[in-house]
Structure formats: structure tokens, C-alpha cells
Image (cartoon, rainbow, N blue to C red):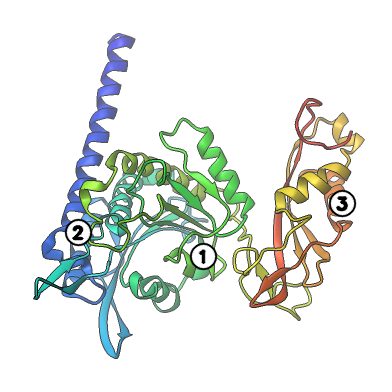
Amino acid sequence: MSLLFLAMFQGRAYAQRLDSIEISLRKNVAYLTDSSMLGRGAGSEQEKRAAAYLYDQLLDAGVIMLTPETGEDFYIVHNGDTLHSQNVIGIVEGYDPKLRNEYVVVGAHYDHLGTSVLKRDGKEVEQIYYGADDNASGVATLIEVARQVASQHFMFRRSVIFALFGAEELGMMGSWYFLNRSFRHTDDIVAMINLDMVGRSGRDNTMQVYTADANVEMMEIINWLSGRALSIAPKYTPTDYFPSDHRNFYQKGIPVALFTSGTHRDYHTVRDTPDKLDYSQMEKLVEYVYSMAEVLANREERIRCATQVKGNGSKDGKETVYTQATVDKRATFLHGDEGQFLNRWVYDYIKYPDSAIRNGIEGRVIAEFIVGSDGKVRDVEIVRGLDDEIDAQVVKVIMASPKWKPAILRGKEVSVRVSVPVEFKLSKSGSLKIKK
């Protein structure tokens, strides 16, 4: 077989695989948004039907199911009524005996707003909130990621859980139930990837990934993935975007990544229909999320959560230390963010140790510290070190930092934990200002 023929054959095979993914994406979105599903309102019979359908889709994808065919039932009290909703959970087990009992969770909510009644020309008319982007798009994408992970299960050291959550529209109840009542191994979850509204595209709806806070290790993974020859490179933002199931994980101290193409004029209206989705973009996101899940599952060390939402944040345990994402106003340095701190302080005053230069040591140090309610920097800790002398330099310079402007929460100054990456490069022509 000639190399040219082989290349043509592989190209056709890749195109056929993409075609099959798009067909599956369209099929699942079409089912979830069909008028007979009446908008999949939380606690409705249609939501229950969707759960049974999605169970079959994950099973067909090769996922081991952990919940019954109709989903794991839980109760919600809403407007005085008791509603039943359900989560659909499956797993692809990792191959590493030491790491298979740690988990990467890929999640998406499958419920939507249901229906409402309005008067038109004096008559009552039922209108359906189809919820194509919110969140049939995320659900359909998750199923294809699950299919890819299951087919390549021998590539994953940790296990990957695929979670389809009910009742997200009523306060993220499905994910809350999973974390607080159903799943007993919350401490073994290393990260959560949330897919919510990933189907729109265009100038106002570029694909984005939010990590809720400046999680440096998650940022490194995203930057590394963007450097690979993947077909999509989501814009990274170290904040939160909107309330969704990832937030319950984040509040448990679990690193998160929310993928979304953002809100739009059709959000939570009857105009959120399947014909407006960009299925090609969803195909590309399948590849990206698969790759991120693989990286998270195969890292030797777990990602440290860059945040600690409440309690035990300081070393003496006498105060609450918040995160930059959970306060009303972030702590700032010279009216800027962490980047300003690096450029206006750290890189101006830190020195490259002579021994490190002689030994050709370069790389990145990740440091965490607390900016107290008084604006003072304290409790500097090296999360990922490079060299003893380099690490000592980082600690020394950060500890000598001038006061920051403290974070504000509910009108009061509070302490927050901050994480920064400090680069050490030997190139004299580099843009960084480390002295030699």
C-alpha cells in the first residue's frame, strides 16, 4: 500500500468518524428537544423519559451504569409540591490499580424549563421551552465523550464518571444530591468537567472554559491542550460564568472546568431550538474534552484546588479564608490582578540564583499565599517547586510584597488565598524581568 493511498484511506476514515459523531449528536439533541418531551421540566414525566433514554445511550456507548434504568430518584420540594427527579450515572473504570479508585467527573444537566401557558387572541396557548442549547447540547456532547473514553478505556489510569444531572434548573439539585447523599467517595474526585450550553458559535458565542478561580495547574493543562493540534482551543478564563452543576463541586474543594459557548438572546426562551446549534463545533469539543479527561486521569499527582471556599484557610485555623472567585471584590495589587503582581513586583525584584544558571535550571514555580483582611501577604507556600534556591527566592520576594487592597465580601474586608506561577527562563531576550 503506497503512502499516498494510506494517507487518503486514513483521511476518509477520520472524516467518516466525524460524520458518525455529528449524526449521533443530532439524533440525541432531536430526541431531547422533540415537542413530545415538553421541555423536560424538572420532576416531570418527560424528564423521567429523558433519563431512561440517556441511560440506554450511555450503556450503548460502553459505559458501566451505576444507576437503575430510570435513574437514581431523589425528591425536591418546589412551591409546596414534592417532585421526583433523577440522576443518570455511569463509569469507565481506570486500569491503574493504585489510581482507579480516584475519579474524573464529566457532567451535564439534562432537564430544562418545561412549558408555560400564555394567552393569545383570548385563548390559552401552551409554549414549549425546547432547551436545545440549554442543555441538550451539553448532554449530546457528553455521550460522545463517553463513547470515546469507553473505546479507549485502556488509556485511562483513573476512572471517569459520566453524570447526567436532573433538576439543575431548580437550584442544581441533582449534582447536590450526587455529592451529598448518593456518592460516598467525594474526596476521591480529582476534577469535574461541566458541559453546559456548548452549542452556539459566532463572534458573541466563542467556546470558553472557566475554572472558577486562578487554578494554575488547570491553566497549564488548558494551555498545553491548546498547543496541541486539536481542532478547537477554548478561551480560558480564571473566573466563574454562571451557576451550574460545577459550582457544587467547586464548593467541595474540587477543581472544575466549565465549558460553555455562553448565553444568548434565545437563552431560557422558546426560541432555543436545535436548528441554531453548531454541530461541527460540538464535534470538535468532543475531542477536546476527551483529551482533557485523559490528562486529568493520567497525571501522577492530583490537581490542588486553588481555592478553599470556607473554613480552615489559615494555618492557625482561626479565620475563614475565601477564594478570589467567591468574594464580591477580588484582592488587588496596584489596582491590578495577579498578573499585575507578577509584572510590577515579583519579576522586578526576584533574582535568578547563580547556581541555577550554572546548572541550566529553568521552569515554573507555583506559589500560593494569603492576602489577609489587612492587605498583608502571609503564609507563602510552594505548591510546585523547581530548585531549593529558586523556591527560596520566590518565597522571599512574595513575603516582601507591599500591601494589597483586601478582598471585599458583603461589605467587609476578608482574607483570600491567591495562586501565581513564576517563570524562570534562561533566555536573555525573554519578556520576563528576572534578574541574573
Image: 190 above or below 75: above
Asked if disc 1 and disc 3 are in contact, CB closer than 8 Å, the reply is no
- Category of crowding for the residue at label 2, using alpha-carbon neighbours closer than 10 angstroms: few (below 14), some (14–19), many (at least 20): many
Residue at left 22%, top 54%?
273
- Category of crowding for the residue at label 3, using alpha-carbon neighbours closer than 10 angstroms: few (below 14), some (14–19), many (at least 20): some
Q: Nearer the viewer, residue 107 or 412?
A: 412
Considering the image in quadrants, where does the N terminus appear?
A: top left
Q: How many marks?
A: 3
Q: Which residue is mark 1?
A: 188
Q: Closer to the N terminus: mark 1 or mark 3? A: 1
Image: 180 above or below 271: below
Asked if disc 2 and disc 3 are in contact, CB closer than 8 Å, the reply is no
What is the spatial separation of the Cα atoms under label 2 and label 3, in whole angstroms?
55 Å
Q: Nearer the viewer, residue 180 or 436?
A: 436
Considering the image in quadrants, where does the C terminus appear?
A: top right
Amino acid at circle 1: Asp
Q: Quadrant of residue 224?
A: top right
Q: Nearer the viewer, residue 135 or 120?
A: 120
Q: Which residue is mark 3?
A: 397
What secondary structure is found at the residue carrying circle 2? helix
